[in-house]
Amino acid sequence: MVPIIDGKLHHFHYVALYDGLAVMQDYESKTLWNHITGEAMYGPLVGHTLKHVGNLLQMNVRQALAVDARMQIAISDREYFVGGKKFGTAPGFGGGRGAERYAASNRDAQLSPVFVETLGKEDTRRPRMDMGLGVWTGGVHRYYPMDLLRQRGDALIDKIDGRNLLVYLEPETYTPAAMFVSAKTAVMNGKDVRLDDGTIVHLGMIVGRDGKPRNVERPQQIFTRWYGFALTFPGCEIAGAPNATSQH
């Protein structure tokens, strides 16, 4: 998000939980902000919304270097766990014992009681800890469950705001992502997504028949638990649900 409000640079930090999600506060005005939508929730700057400059996407080093071979890699000293081993020295958010229990890959994950106490009225159409990709535009808020993507062969084409949207599980990280495309069908083929217009999606980029990368346009999106997206966008659509709407 762009941290400039009325022409002045603001500085943000994490201060609290609301609806089980992190809340930001800026040092300058002490306003509380929603970290997904960028909306001011409480304080003197209510009515302002931080502009989105891009999406927070999951990628590995290989994908990052494919985007820009000169990209610098920053390695945090926060604690993290991979393959049962601990790395890093500084305390991490949710690190230590129990961190893996809450991991996205754990289907039996339970929300910490500290988070539960902050929840508002929940949407019970999906399990609280269900994982999926939340996508939103000016007029559409839609959730794509991981289970749906797996059932569709890890890739599907939907419509949002009248445009074709590719939603797929990125083979490198096995996390969902979405981008606008001109194709009508998509099929996973090894590490690539093959589209019926002759293009492929490789390492998060669209590559044309000539082998050259094309510009990628994405809607706002976040890989999230169901409860977080549903509480942020009450009444949101669920892709694949019996009453789901996919034409907008």
Image (cartoon, helix red, strand yellow):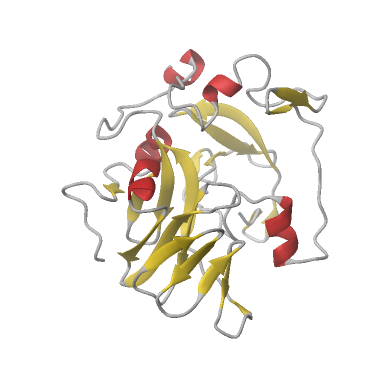
Q: Nearer the viewer, residue 239 or 120?
A: 239
Relative to residue 29, is residue 188 depicted above or below? below
Q: Nearer the viewer, residue 21 or 104?
A: 104
Rendering coords of residue 12 (x, y %): 67, 41
Q: Is residue 26 left or right of residue 111?
A: right
Quadrant of residue 126 within the rendered picture: top left
Q: Is residue 202 visible?
A: yes
Which residue sits furthest left? 243
Q: Which quadrant of the rendered structure holds the C terminus?
A: bottom left
Q: Residue at x 66, y 26 (%)?
A: 93
Q: Is residue 124 left or right of residue 193?
A: left
Q: Nearer the viewer, residue 36 or 4?
A: 36
Rendering coords of residue 199 (x, y %): 50, 77
Q: Residue at x 71, y 44 (%)?
A: 11
Q: Which quadrant of the rendered structure holds the N terminus?
A: bottom right
Rendering coords of residue 247 (x, y %): 24, 65
Q: Is residue 17 left or right of residue 138?
A: right
Relative to residue 221, is residue 179 depicted above or below? below
Relative to residue 71, is residue 207 depicted above or below? below
Q: Is residue 37 visible?
A: no
Rendering coords of residue 231 (x, y %): 37, 36
Q: Residue at x 32, y 29 (%)?
A: 127
